[in-house]
């Protein structure tokens, strides 16, 4: 995955995708696989915004039962399965639990019936999955077991617990990269830090995009027949207000990370304490659900809260007061947790499109329920220009497939012969000497790489082979947390990592739960500085930019 601006300028593309989040990445993959010449351009780093901000749950759509929306359920089930097939090392089964009360809508009997219906709809959920990643059918557990799993739970009316299985993305950012790398293997060209400033039209049709390389401030023209704007909250910057369909409202979606493992074994769903009416639901529960998701070894992710956001996407930021408000809400929902602001080590926040919100009510944000594809040729005569207003991380693969079908029907593009998968060319490297040098440590290193990179582990190991250790050197740049020298080289030269933040936030999980220590950041910045010719002052600046993300949590 090499950035090549000269190829971008000299190639006539069928499609330019604007935005390198999950919707842009899945579209680049599907379009390249369908045989289109594709370029994907991202103004920041890949998965650097909303796609990185979630509870990491890859939902199968069971929540849509209350809406009677079986179409959305199938989209979620199919998309979840595709993600688990594409990256089985990154998307794993997640056991979920919701306590049941009484014998009505929140009772065990109702939930048992709901799971039976869901399991029928999700009949093919395990198709193509490795046995260890299979998702079991829903079940229930006893009242006593719920009390053991959720200490201090409200016991009045408690009848047991409903258990179902979704999936968790161990690294949402690397999952985006997996899609991008697969797109490249089908011939796509991708580039980060490349801002699309303008779409050039000719005779009512898309002709090109004007691009600025933000690392060199160089401008260029990239010829293309179609553009799909998948820029998330920056949607309107390129296509106008509301993507041409009216004023778009946005909400801050916020999850917090606490350094407490509140629950073992399950991600637990607990009801909020404020009234909430989902206007699209046929069966209304009356409260919004909060999920408590075990994360890594010592943490819990909790969310999601939604508040209307006013302002430009570039000015989006979070305050300590917003975090404290969420913490206050969570302590009312689960008092036994006894959380305080010192327990909060990180937060995940992003902007999502909403239909409406009432500032006079505590919990009134109504999210857009489904992602939308906007065809600007029908709206305002800009033929070949499309926008994807993405709502759910999980359903991005299905939305991408729909977008490709629209492109195939477009008289300007039409269908193409299926793309040809191009495996990475052999490096002609002899791994033998490196394996001998590692000795008994080789198997442990291999197991570590397979866990992180799946079948691509050899591509990372190749950098160790190309850079043999000198006497006294270690192949570990860090031992706790673990990080190989070969990994950092791989991030820089194969995954376009250009900043320290790119590595600690979006190439590794080093900053997924809390700020790495200054010593850890300095170690990585020092090594990167040697590869990218950073001065000591630049290394310090890179460290400070990472720490600034956590600034509101510094007590």
Image (spheres, rainbow, N blue to C red):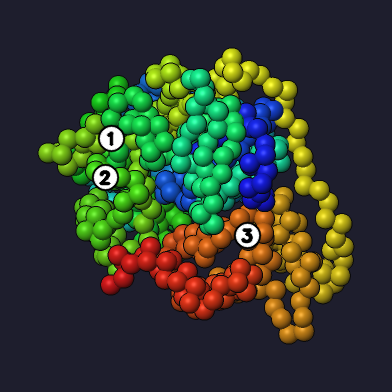
> Looking at the image, is 201 positioned above or below residue 363?
above
Image coordinates of residue 163 in percent, x first then y, are 44, 40
- Residue 49 vs 139, above or below: the answer is below
Q: How far apart are marks 2 and 1 (CA)?
A: 10 Å
Res. 528 visible in picture: yes
Q: Name the residue under label 1.
A: 249
- Residue at the spot 30% in from the left edge and 45% down from the top edge: 312
Image point (83%, 51%), residue name: 426
Within 10 Å of disc 2 (Cα), the crowding (few <14, some 14-19, many 20+) is few
Which of 107 and 524 lies nearest the eye of the viewer? 524
The answer to whether the residues at label 3 and label 2 have Cβ atoms under 8 Å apart is no
Name the element at disc 3.
helix
The residue tagged 2 is: 311
- Estimate the x, y position of residue 497 in percent, counting from the top left: 58, 58
| Residue, disc 3 | 491
Q: Distance between the residues labelled 3 and 2?
A: 34 Å
CB under 8 Å between discs 2 and 1: no
Q: Nearer the viewer, mark 3 or mark 2?
A: 2
Judge from the rendering whether residue 5 lies leftward or rightward of residue 160; answer left or right: right
Q: Position of residue 310 (x, y in %)?
A: 24, 43
């Amino acid at each position: 995955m090499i950035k090549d601006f000269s190829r971008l300028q000299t190639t006539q593309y069928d499609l330019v995708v604007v935005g390198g989040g999950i919707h842009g990445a899945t579209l680049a993959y599907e379009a390249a696989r369908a045989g289109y010449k594709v370029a994907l351009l991202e103004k920041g780093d890949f998965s650097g915004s909303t796609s990185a901000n979630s509870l990491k749950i890859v939902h199968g759509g069971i929540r849509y039962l209350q809406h009677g929306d079986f179409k959305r359920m199938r989209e979620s089930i199919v998309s979840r399965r595709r993600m688990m097939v594409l990256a089985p090392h990154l998307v794993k089964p997640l056991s979920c639990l919701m306590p049941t009360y009484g014998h009505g809508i929140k009772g065990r009997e109702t939930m048992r019936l709901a799971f039976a219906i869901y399991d029928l709809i999700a009949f093919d959920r395990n198709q193509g999955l490795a046995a260890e990643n299979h998702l079991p059918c829903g079940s229930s557990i006893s009242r006593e077991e719920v009390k053991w799993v959720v200490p201090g739970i409200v016991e009045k009316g408690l009848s047991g617990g409903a258990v179902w299985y979704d999936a968790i993305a161990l690294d949402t950012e690397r999952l985006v990269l997996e899609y991008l790398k697969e797109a490249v293997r089908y011939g796509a060209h991708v580039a980060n830090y490349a801002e699309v400033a303008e779409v050039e039209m000719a005779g009512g049709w898309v002709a090109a995009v004007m691009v600025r390389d933000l690392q060199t401030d160089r401008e260029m023209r990239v010829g293309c027949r179609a553009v799909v704007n998948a820029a998330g909250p920056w949607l309107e910057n390129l296509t106008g207000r509301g993507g041409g369909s009216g004023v778009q409202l946005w909400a801050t979606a916020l999850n917090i990370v606490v350094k407490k493992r509140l629950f073992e074994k399950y991600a637990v769903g607990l009801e909020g304490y404020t009234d909430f009416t989902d206007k699209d639901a046929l069966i209304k529960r009356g409260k919004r659900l909060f999920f408590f998701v075990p994360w890594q070894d010592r943490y819990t992710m909790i969310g999601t809260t939604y508040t209307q956001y006013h302002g430009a996407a570039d000015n989006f930021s979070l305050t300590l007061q917003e975090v404290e408000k969420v913490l206050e809400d969570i302590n009312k929902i689960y008092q036994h947790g006894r959380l305080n602001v010192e327990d909060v080590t990180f937060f995940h926040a992003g902007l999502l499109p909403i239909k409406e919100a009432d500032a006079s009510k505590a919990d009134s944000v109504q999210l857009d329920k489904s992602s939308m594809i906007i065809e600007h040729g029908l709206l305002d005569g800009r033929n070949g220009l499309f926008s994807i207003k993405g709502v759910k991380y999980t359903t991005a693969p299905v939305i991408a497939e729909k977008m490709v079908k629209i492109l195939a029907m477009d008289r300007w593009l039409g269908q193409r012969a299926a793309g040809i998968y191009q495996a990475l060319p052999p490096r002609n490297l002899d791994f033998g000497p490196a394996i001998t040098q590692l000795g008994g440590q080789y198997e442990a290193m291999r197991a570590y790489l397979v866990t992180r990179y799946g079948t691509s582990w050899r591509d990372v190991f190749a950098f160790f082979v190309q850079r043999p250790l000198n006497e006294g050197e270690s192949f570990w740049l860090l031992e706790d947390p673990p990080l190989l020298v070969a990994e950092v080289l791989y991030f820089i030269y194969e995954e376009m990592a250009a900043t320290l933040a790119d590595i600690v936030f979006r190439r590794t999980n080093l900053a997924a739960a809390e700020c790495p220590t200054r010593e850890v950041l300095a170690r990585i910045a020092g090594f990167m500085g040697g590869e990218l010719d950073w001065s000591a002052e630049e290394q310090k600046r890179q460290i400070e930019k990472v720490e600034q993300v956590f600034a509101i949590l510094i007590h």
